[in-house]
Image (spheres, helix red, strand yellow):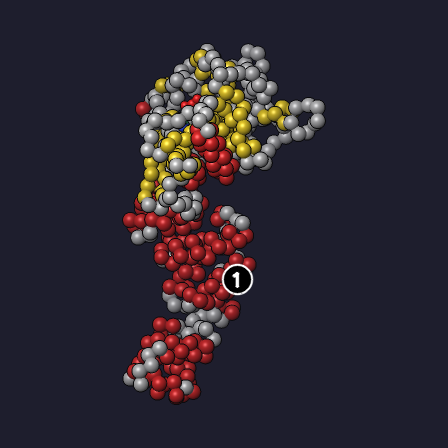
Amino acid sequence: MDLVSDQEFLIKRNNNTYEVVIGLEVHAQVISNSKLFSTSSTKFGAEPNTQVSLVDAAFPGMLPVINEFCVKQAIKTGIGLKAKINKKSVFDRKNYFYADLPQGYQISQYKYPIVGEGNVILDMPSGQKEIGIERLHLEQDAGKSIHDIDPNNTFVDLNRSGVALMEIVSKPDLRSPDEVNLYIKKLRSIMRYLGTCDGNMQEGSLRADVNVSVRKKGETNFGTRCEIKNVNSIKFMQMAIIYEANRQVDLIEDGKSIDQETRLFDTKKNETRSMRSKEDAHDYRYFPDPDLLPLEISDKFIQDIQTDIPELPDEKKKRFIDKFKLSPYEANILVSDIETSKYFEAVIKEADVKLATNWITGELFAVLNDKNLEISDSPISANNLAKLINLIKDGTISGKIAKTVFEQMVDTNENPQKIVQERGLQQQSDPKALEELIDKVIENNADKVSQYKSGKDKLFGFFVGQVMKESKGKGNPQLINKILKEKLNG
Ligand code: ADP
Ligand code: MG
């Protein structure tokens, strides 16, 4: 979970205060075995040009055939974004020339996207903020140019050519790098819950064009925006926004104006630079692709998908708070990643909710962090963690001993019951045996006993500690407390 501040992101220069306005065009690769208009595989990491059909390579006369599964994935995502699903949408050709685009155009949706307006909720420390979604449309990915294999030649890998992307366009509702961080993570979380995009940014499954403008605080009109193309990590998005916003403020303070342009973020120099200005902006000459009919979907088609939508993070969070009395903070941590929520739900099927929350967000997360592991690769299974919690709950071991057992579980993946048995870690809960230890401590500390009896209450902790020590850490603390009180006060 990211701790974000609620402080406004403002830039001050001279006597002026500026705020930043951000809108994102996120490109999310659709989870699908085959491409948007061909049957080629989409598997990541294959040898170059081994997953290219004649359609993907744009051989003359080849015809695209829409992949129904990708359409379903886009609708699913639209439902997850609480968005309007358009029963009629149109595929257009977006014309431009590039070496990695064999068709000479990209099939995309322009005027009539498959998904219309929706929203994404950000959980800010002070409450929720809604970010508007403008649209979601389906389009093909291009191939990849490889410039660093040969000093004189560029190579082209068409494996990615034709892979389905969802372009998710936000309204200009974001106001800070922190909000962008939360927005991308929330979007990714929703798509992972839905199984529509794996959100893997290292593999390029999620990348964004970042639109940035600035305006004086209090102003109602938007400033001129610049679009930073194809940023592939949250960190880089944030760095690019900070750089770009400051650049624009400097220009305005110098009495200059902002040119609407497309820029690139140089991750090594931490700066954006101009790629092309609006004047030489592409005229993509969009027109409906004559090889594809308009996409018309029925109510039934949408309803069938609707019934397939799992519980999403916002709803799950609400349920966790209502049903299990978790704090919003705890609920956020547990739902933000679908695997974490599954793990949590598996543990609480068999064990106490409060303890499960504490052990997962405390000890378990610390170990996963330390070992750089995903929860799905946790060295401790949900089942074994539940067993450990039950050993605490039924008084077999103390919380303190549980930590020792937990450490061994991390190393050996063993059943905690077995560890407790083998190492004889069971809590001493036999009142008779504890009484013997208590009598011994009282006998050996006659001076302290009389001090206690004459009013030095604080000494109680000392007696508890001594008895604990006598029991080698295994005495049941509640019982020790109870018997000690009876003996000392009686
Ligand atoms: P284009 O294809 O020209 O980039 P889109 O409609 O696809 O246009 O995307 C525009 C993006 O820019 C949206 O995410 C929108 O929220 C954002 N945007 C529009 N105006 C501004 C502005 N003044 N400042 C920042 N972002 C903006
Ligand atoms: Mg754009």
- Quarter the C terminus occupies: bottom left
Left/right of residue 219 with respect to residue 204 in the rendered view: left
Nearest to the observer: residue 232 or residue 46: 232
Q: Position of residue 445 (x, y in %)?
A: 41, 86
Q: Position of residue 389 (x, y in %)?
A: 41, 60
Q: Is mark 1 within 8 Å of ligand 1?
A: no
- Residue at which label 1 appears: 408
Nearest to the observer: residue 23 or residue 28: 23
The relative height of residue 62 versus residue 206 in the rendered view (above or below) is above
Residue drawn at (48%, 61%), measured in percent from left and top? 406
**Picture quadrant where residue 144 is located:** top right
Q: Residues within 10 Å of mark 1 (few under 14, many from 20)?
A: some
Residue drawn at (41%, 31%), measured in percent from left and top? 214
Residue drawn at (42%, 36%), measured in percent from left and top? 14
The relative height of residue 439 versus residue 306 in the rendered view (above or below) is below
Nearest to the observer: residue 315 or residue 232: 232
Residue 42 visible from this viewpoint: yes
Q: Position of residue 87 (x, y in %)?
A: 34, 21
